[in-house]
Image: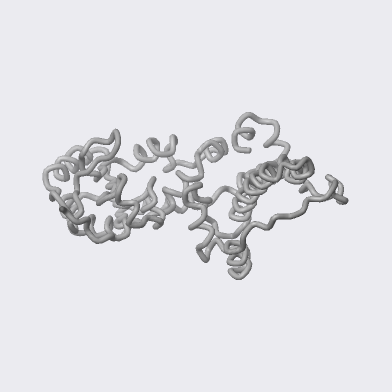
């Protein structure tokens, strides 16, 4: 029985793969090389478990449009069958067995990933309709070579929102909390403890997302599958490690819910109506999707 090779973090594997196998095939053609985009390996969250689905040596190579065809041909012909005992050509689900060295131009790659050419300044609408996870995928990962500096410039532009967009997103997140916060108590008052707990858990998720937006990490919040690791990293520690540890390890308490709360609804609900960002959030179609 074939044994699975020893796990190597994807970013480390990709860097070695580029330097030892891919880079020499590109030769003296000016280019950039990186591992960015989608995947837990891009954010450094991959583990040995990740290797059972769409994981392996891969890298993106960005060249001028006039060099794409020739560089692609050299890569197709020259790649080894395996690298560090991992197959270079692999597939999963609907993806056929093939190598995963993408040779393209940077604008074409960004349009395919983000839906917009981010080598040019983004309009406000572009920021609002582009999923946060994809923005994080471009600004995260690792760059192994950048002859023109264009890739570094784009990554720097996408590392965080413009201030106006950031404030609008904060208003949206407060609005989400305000819409459901009263129902934690109301469901408990009618004896629906399970429903109250579900709502409280959902609010806790939104509070974590708000905290990540408020924190001066200057990184877009990661997707739902990555939020727990992202929350645990030093750059995203909003609360003290002692407080977070206490809440992670303690079991949810069963509380004898009493009658109606003495605090008024106005006192218990975050005040968001005065925010111009919240008003925009509640009124526009794009905002309703974001909220």
Left or right: 133 in relation to 83: right
Give above or below for 245 relative to 178: below
Q: Judge whether residue 272 can be spotted in this image.
A: no
The quadrant in which residue 10 appears is: bottom left
Rendered view: 171 above or below 217: above
Closer-to-camera residue (267/174): 267
On the image, the x and y values in percent for residue 204 come to 64, 51
In this picture the colour scheme is: one colour
- Tell me the quadrant of the picture where the C terminus can be found: top right
User: Percent x, y for residue 72?
Assistant: 19, 41
Q: Is residue 190 visible?
A: yes
Could you say which is closer to the camera, residue 244 or residue 74? 244
* Count of numbered circles on the image: 0
Q: Residue at x 44, y 36 (%)?
A: 116
In the image, what residue occupies the spot 27% across and 38% down? 65
Query: From the viewer's perspective, is 186 left or right of 200?
Result: right
User: Residue at the location (30% across, 36% down)?
Assistant: 93
x then y, percent, for residue 26: 18, 50
From what the image shows, is residue 184 above or below residue 288?
below
Q: Position of residue 217 (x, y in %)?
A: 55, 59
Horizontal relation, residue 231 to residue 151: left or right: right
**Left or right of 23 on screen, residue 110:** right
Looking at the image, the residue that sits furthest to the top is 285
């Amino acid at each position: 029985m074939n044994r699975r090779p020893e796990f190597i973090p994807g970013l480390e594997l990709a860097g070695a793969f580029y330097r030892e196998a891919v880079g020499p095939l590109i030769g003296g053609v000016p280019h950039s090389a990186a591992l960015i985009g989608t995947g837990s390996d891009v954010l450094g969250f991959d583990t040995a478990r990740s290797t059972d689905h769409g994981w392996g040596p891969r890298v993106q190579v960005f060249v001028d449009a006039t060099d794409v065809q020739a560089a692609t041909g050299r890569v197709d012909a020259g790649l080894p069958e395996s690298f560090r005992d991992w197959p270079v050509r692999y597939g999963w689900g609907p993806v056929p067995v093939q190598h995963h060295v993408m040779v393209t131009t940077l604008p074409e790659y960004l349009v395919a990933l983000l839906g917009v050419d981010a080598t040019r300044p983004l309009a406000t609408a572009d920021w609002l309709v582009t999923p946060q996870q994809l923005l994080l995928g471009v600004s995260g990962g690792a760059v192994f070579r950048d002859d023109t500096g264009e890739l570094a410039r784009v990554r720097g532009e996408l590392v965080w929102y413009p201030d106006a967009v950031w404030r609008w997103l904060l208003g949206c997140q407060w609005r989400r909390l305000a819409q459901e916060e009263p129902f934690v108590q109301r469901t408990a008052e009618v004896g629906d403890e399970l429903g109250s707990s579900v709502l409280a858990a959902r609010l806790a998720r939104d509070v974590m997302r708000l905290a990540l937006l408020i924190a001066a990490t200057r990184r877009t919040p990661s997707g739902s599958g990555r939020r727990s690791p992202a929350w645990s990293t030093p750059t995203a520690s909003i609360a003290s490690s002692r407080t977070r540890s206490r809440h992670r390890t303690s079991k949810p308490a069963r509380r004898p819910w009493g009658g109606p709360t003495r605090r008024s609804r106005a006192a218990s609900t975050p005040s968001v109506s005065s925010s111009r960002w919240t008003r925009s959030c509640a009124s526009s179609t794009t905002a309703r999707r974001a909220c």
